Amino acid sequence: MSNSPLLEIKDLHAGIGDKEILKGLSLTVDKNEVHAIMGPNGSGKSTLANVLAGHPGYKVTGGEVLFHGKSLLAMKPDERAHAGLFLAFQYPVAVPGVTMVNFLRQALNAKHGGEMPIREFREKLFSKMGLLKMDQEFARRYVNDGFSGGEKKRAEMLQMAMLEPSLAVLDETDSGLDIDALRTVAEGVNALMNPEMGLLLITHYQRLLNYIKPQFVHVLIDGRIVRSGGAELAEELERTGYEEEEALVAGGKA
Amino acid sequence: MTTAETLIKEGGYKWGFYDPEEALFKANKGLTHEIIDVMSDMKEEPQWMRDFRHRALDIFRQKQNPPWATEQLNDIDFEGIHYYVKATDKDATSWEDTPDYIKRTFDKLGIPEAEKKYLAGVGAQYDSEVVYHNIREDLKKQGVIFLGTDQGLQEHEDLFKEFFGTIIPPADNRFAALNSAVWSGGSFIYVPKGVKVDIPLQAYFRINTKDMGQFERTLIIADEGSQVHYVEGCTAPTYSSDSLHSAVVEIIVKKGARVRYTTIQNWSNNVYNLVTKRAAAYQDAVMEWVDGNLGSKLTMKYPSVYLMEPGAHGEILSLAFAGEGQHQDAGGKVVHAAPNTTSTIISKSISKDGGRSSYRGLLKVYEDCDHVKSTVRCDALLLDKESRSDTYPTMEVDAPNVRVQHEAYVSRLAEDQLFYLMSRGLTEDAAAKMIVNGFVEPIVKELPMEYAVELNRLIELQMEGAVG
């Protein structure tokens, strides 16, 4: 793993079809760091999350992404997961008929390249569920099928806890959560964070950052990071909104 | 060739092997009154059965294929089929008494082993005749009858004659007529009043001879308050020419009785599988069909329940998987012929590599049948753009006070689901298998564990190389 940073995004250009959404995005995230990317709707936040995880619907047209020093963009989504990347989805899809426990077991087996003893797996599962204050019955439900917004986000956190990624990308994890659910999810993330891990929070609003404290905040406007700073930047944005930055970018273009 | 190479060549079908033909008797190809006399002589049948067969052949010759049937049905050459192939003289009650090559075949299929582990009784049919039948001693003592159908006729003629052909008369459809003319083998089951057979009875059907027709005939009578679960499985060698399997299954579920009939159909892809299955359920009786169709070239099969008296309940769970060159035309029929009756039909189909699956169903409620409740739900999953799915539901509701729900959905293997599962480390193949297994879960979970495992394994074999 050498001394290369956890994640290095260099001048990334990507979009859907012919529409370019990311227009030269650069960012470095190292282990034991929490970064937040904030931006208004349509700025490219979800595109970034999907491109990192390898969604086939997005096309990368330029730049590179190194993960543990290796080219991430050449990998398939499952290889990215094996390399240690995890995306907590904004809208996790339902997989009816597949229980959480079966799904998690197969995902873990795939990661370890072999069958994990069932007992070891169960112990791990129940301890992580305990950490996230989840009822054990939850493991028997079908993946995201009929889950409430809060349950979906908690299920994402459970997957993250089980897979123990080196980099977790949380895409709008606060959306659709009431304040209690938000607190529970955020506490879960904090409990899972460790010094070997990096965290990239993607969010429109500052409220998640009240619970998960970032060291670095970046403002994403129109596919580029236009400003970076510390935690105080998030508070400033909460007061002033994105208008100032957007105006700056628009002005720059003109 | 290695096993793996053979598997790939046969498209993942593991049961395509065949035994050298060592039949004691093999009728010449073709369907004639003479063949019927030969069969009836060899089986030493009563005159009424011989007459029944001859009449049925006349009916068959007058009948056409159903007008809604796929054109593929016209490809069957009824004169190019051996209608009766008898491998051995004996319906043994011990595997040791079956010919060595037949025992080896059923060993390969895992039947004797399953019998020891989790079955209450087993019947095994090889080509036209039942070669093995056995039932647990305690059930026999309680009066449960589980025999080959020919033996059932020999030993219990009165009971047999009371019900045989009453649920599905020869004139019902062309293939019921054909079966009635040349039927051979199948299971004859009687469960006495109040007796509950708590673990399954299984029959296994194997076609070996090339260009052969198998026409088993099953008759199940569940007396008042009794209970039984019957499971059938089937396989055949992979030949370049087609075989025909055309069975008739009649079930009588008397007052308060409960019958579940589970099929795991895994014929090789050169078998036409044209089967008529029907049950009559009386007061407060429950009839359940669990019908899994994975193999065959063309299957046409719509298990039916006639709800004859108040309180009767019918349930049909149909699962079809159509791969390359396969057409699964499956579904179910429920006829509400009494008030206060209920039914559920759940159909799940998967099509891949240009395979075609059709749901064909009938829900009929006769007039004066108030307080009927019925739910029909069909889900079709298409794994690629070449595959096809059709739904042909028919509803004839002639009573005013009924609650009927019908839902049908067709979906494609969703890119978002694949991506989601892959993002957790599953390969594309593993992700597709997981989605398909989830899709069929509502049906698989109804099966005893051993069969659920078997069915999932068969689906996974069908799924090999499904994506990418």
Image (tube, coloured by chain):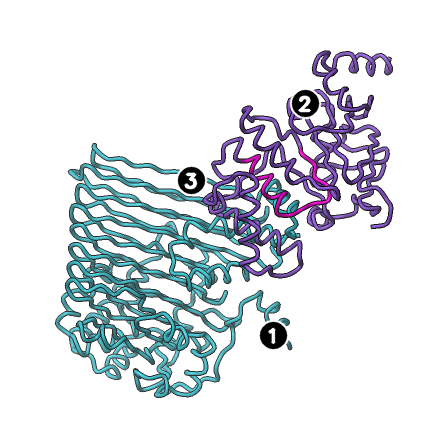
* Residue type at tag 2: His
* Residue type at tag 1: Thr
| Secondary structure state at the residue bearing disc 1 | helix
The residue at 51%/52% (across/down) is: B437
Choose between A95 and B360: the one closer to the eye.
Answer: A95
Q: Which mark is residue B3?
A: 1
| Label 1 in the same subunit as label 3 | yes
Quadrant where the image shows the N terminus of chain B? bottom right
Q: Chain of mark 1?
A: B
Q: Earlier in the sequence, mark 1 or mark 3?
A: 1
Chain B: its colour in the image is: cyan
Cα gap from disc 1 to disc 3, whole angstroms: 40 Å
Magenta stretch bounds: A152-170
B30 vs A116, left or right, is: left
* Residue type at tag 3: Ala
Q: Position of residue B357 (x, y in %)?
A: 47, 51
Instruction: Identify residue for label 2.
Output: A204
| Secondary structure state at the residue bearing disc 2 | loop
Cα gap from disc 1 to disc 2, whole angstroms: 56 Å
Circle 1 crowding by C-alpha within 10 Å: few under 14, some 14–19, many from 20: few
Chain A: its colour in the image is: purple
The residue at 41%/61% (across/down) is: B449
